[in-house]
Structures are given as structure tokens and as C-alpha cells.
Amino acid sequence: MRKLSLGILLALALPVAAQAQDAPTPFEHYEAGRYGDAVAGAEAGLASDPQNPVWWALLAEAQARLGENLEAAEAFGSAARFEANTARRSYFLRAQALQLVYAGRHDEARAIVRAAMDDPSLETRNSLDWAMVAISARDDRSAQEILDNEALYSEFTRQTALDAGYSAKRRGMDKRAVDFFERGLALDAEEETPLGPLQRQGIRRENRELTRDWSFIAQGSFSSAGRPIGPANTPLGDERAPQFGAEVSRRIGGWRNGRPFSIFARVYHSEFLSDDAVTGNATQGWVGVRYKPLSQVNLNLEASRLVGLDNDGLDDWSLRAAISGGQGLEPEVGKRSWAYARYYGDVSYLTDADVTFGLAEGRAGYSFLLDENATVLTPYAVARLGVDTGRLEEEALGAGIGVSLRHWFDETDTIAYRGFIDFDVQARQRIAGDRRASGVLATLTIGR
């Protein structure tokens, strides 16, 4: 955020006050960095002239320099109360709010911002400074109300544009957030110290999520070791089973600051090549809704209607929760290789069949960049636990090795990669439970 320049107002106002009071010493102390002496001098001046806003301002500025934030906030409030000039009063109130922020009193800082918004004489809606103070006070509603005034955008610096972007993101104003982020990236060229590659990539990834209003994934797999990790989450047995399918989803209401709500439809077809299948060769459809309730955790809750698209498909209701995360999952800026780790958990319940399917998988490996920035090879070790309450032996735990080859595509200067093609093969050996823990799983996935 753009910092208010402490002392600028004093530089204009204090010489006059000094002449009027014939006591320049406290101001000289302040200018020389002797802030304790400046506090003492200001208090002495207030003893004889308690309603002088300049003395209050000197006291506040000196206390702020000493880190006495609450005392400085109170003094700035007194300076604003006794100040007749609107511009200086607006400055004092902004400084008061900031000192309260520095003291951790965000509620009180927000109260000052909102009171200022209700005072037409302060013209807060024409002030980028007030918007930045509102953001510091965690009052994104007021900040974005001020930023409805597009004339203020010409005053943006890189940092104010980025701060405004994060504020708009928190308010669920996705298009505005993207505009501010793109302005910040463009203004970076004017800064003496440009953003680092990791910082730019972080902003480009923000834009990716903010602009993604639909997604698509298509997958083909061959398994001799139970069902694949995919959006289908259907029961496969110990048999060899190719599976093909796709899902399309649409966000309703945008990114919602990391809590998107989506509707989706998917279709998967499974071919069972032995006689040990839980179901026969089946074409299965789903229609449902998905919600991500936590902004910082990739946990998705899902409710759907299963629709059998042939005689062996199921008609049922499904409740599902899936969580995933890790590190090194995308190309890392400026590196040719990096550590890779991923975890995935998935539980679904079919209400009519009264069957639960569960899957937990952990991977750890190392990724290698094969070209400039888009193709990654990742060998890894894997452990996987499957649960299927419809079987006599419900659990199956296995471990082994795998390799993934992934190519990323569809990026712009301001938006990170949105699509990928991934070919993944893993071989596992049973550790405990059912023999379906052993086998080979090969999966080809295209997503965007």
C-alpha cells in the first residue's frame, strides 16, 4: 500500500506555528530525530494552547516515530478535532486510522474510515489515499466503494494497483481484481525495483483462478489394480479395466475469494476384461453440484445424481468429499528441477446402495523440466490405500513407483498456464488387505 508521508503536513504547517508560538525548538528536535524531546516540547505547547492542532500533530508524529501507535492515534484524533482545514483534517484522520492498524485495532480503524465516508466534506470517494487506508483497516467494502471512481486509477502505482486487486478479490469482484492485477503488472516497468519472477507468477496464478469460469477434463485409463484417481470415482475390481470419460463444470458466481460453487456433468465408460467386476461393462453419468468451502484448502464437497446410461449403469445419489495439495505441482520459476510431493484423499457414499468408496494416495519424488518452461517429467514413489465397503475385504494398501510426464499450455503475459496434458504410469505391490492393491495403472488426462 502507498505509505502516507509522515511529516509532510508538518513541513507545511509547523513553521507558521513555530513563528506563532515563538518556540521552534520542539520542531527542530523532530527534524533532527530527537523524537522524545519533540514529544516533551509538544506537550509543553499543549499545556498553554490545548486546542492547537499543530501541537497535536507534532505530538502524534513524534509518538508515531517512537512506535507509540495508540498514543499517536489519540493525538492525531485530537489534531483532526481541532483542525478547521478540510484537507489537513482528512490527513489527520487517515493517519489516526493507520496508527490504529499498526496497533492491531482494526475495528477502531474501520470505524474511522466509515465515519469519514459519511462526511461529504472529506471527499473520501475522490481519494486513493483513503482507499488504501480502508484496505489497511481490512474494510474492503469501503475501499471498493471508493474505487468505483475510475478517475483514481490514473494515480495507481504498482503496489496500490496490486493492493486494490487483492481487495477486490476478497470482495468477490473478479473482473475488477483482474484489471487491477494487470495494471499492477504493467506499472511494474516503472518501478526501480521490479517484481521478482516468483511474485509475477503468483499474480498470474491469481488471474488464472479469477478468470476460470468453466473447466473441462477428459481421461482415459487402464487399470489392473482398482479404480483410477479421476473425477469418476467408480468401483472397479481386481480385473483389467480400461475406462474413458469426461467432465465439464461451470462456476456460478465466480471465484468467490477461493470458495467457488459449480455445477457439473460427467460421463464415464468402463470395460471390464475379466469376470471379477463389481458391475458389468458400464456407461455411467453424473449431474451435480460442487462447493469449495475453505479458501486456503483444496477441499471440495460434492452432491450428485448418478444416471445409468446403459443396463449396467447405476441410478443412485452420491455424496463426495475430495481433498488434495502438495508442493512442486507446477513448473517452478527459474528452476530446472525441484522436489515434488502430492497428497490426495477422496471419499464418496452411494445412498441407495449404502456403499462407501474411499481412496488416499501420497506421492513424493523429483520433477525435471524438459524444455524451457512447460514440459515436466516426474518420477515418484507412491503409497495408496483404497476402501470399498461393498467387498468382503474392504481395505487394500499398496505402494510402488510411478512416473508422470506433463505438458502445460494456454498461458498469456498476465495469466498462468490454464491447461495440461498428463501421462501417468504407476506400478504398485500389495502391502496389506485385498490383492487389488497390486497392479499397474496408466492414465492419460487432458484438463483445462
Image (tube, rainbow, N blue to C red):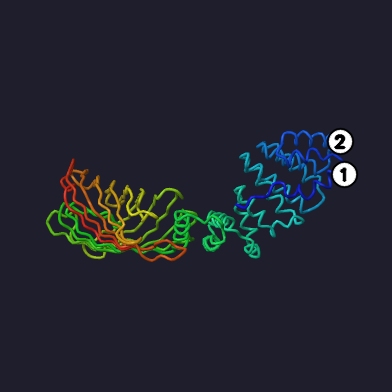
Q: Distance between the residues labelled 2 and 1?
A: 13 Å
Please state which of residues 47 and 357 is positioned toward the viewer in this rendering: 47
Q: Position of residue 148 (x, y in %)?
A: 63, 62
2 or 1: tag closer to the N-terminus: 1
Quarter where residue 122 is shown:
bottom right
Please state which of residues 442 and 185 is positioned toward the viewer in this rendering: 185
Residue kind at label 1, given as amino acid type: Ala
Residue 358 visible in image = no
- 42 up-or-down from 312: above or below: above
The residue positioned 84% from the left and 41% from the top of the image is 51
Q: What residue is disc 1 on?
A: 20
Residue kind at label 2, given as amino acid type: Ser
Q: What residue is disc 2 on?
A: 48
Side of 201 relative to 121 (left or right) = left
Q: Residues within 10 Å of mark 2 (few under 14, many from 20)?
A: few
- Disc 1, SS: helix
- Disc 2, SS: helix
The residue positioned 54% from the left and 60% from the top of the image is 188
Q: Where is residue 9 in the image (x, y as percent from the top left)?
A: 75, 49
Q: Nearer the viewer, mark 2 or mark 1?
A: 1
Q: Position of residue 252 (x, y in %)?
A: 46, 61
Quarter where residue 368 is shown:
bottom left
Side of 413 relative to 394 (left or right) = right
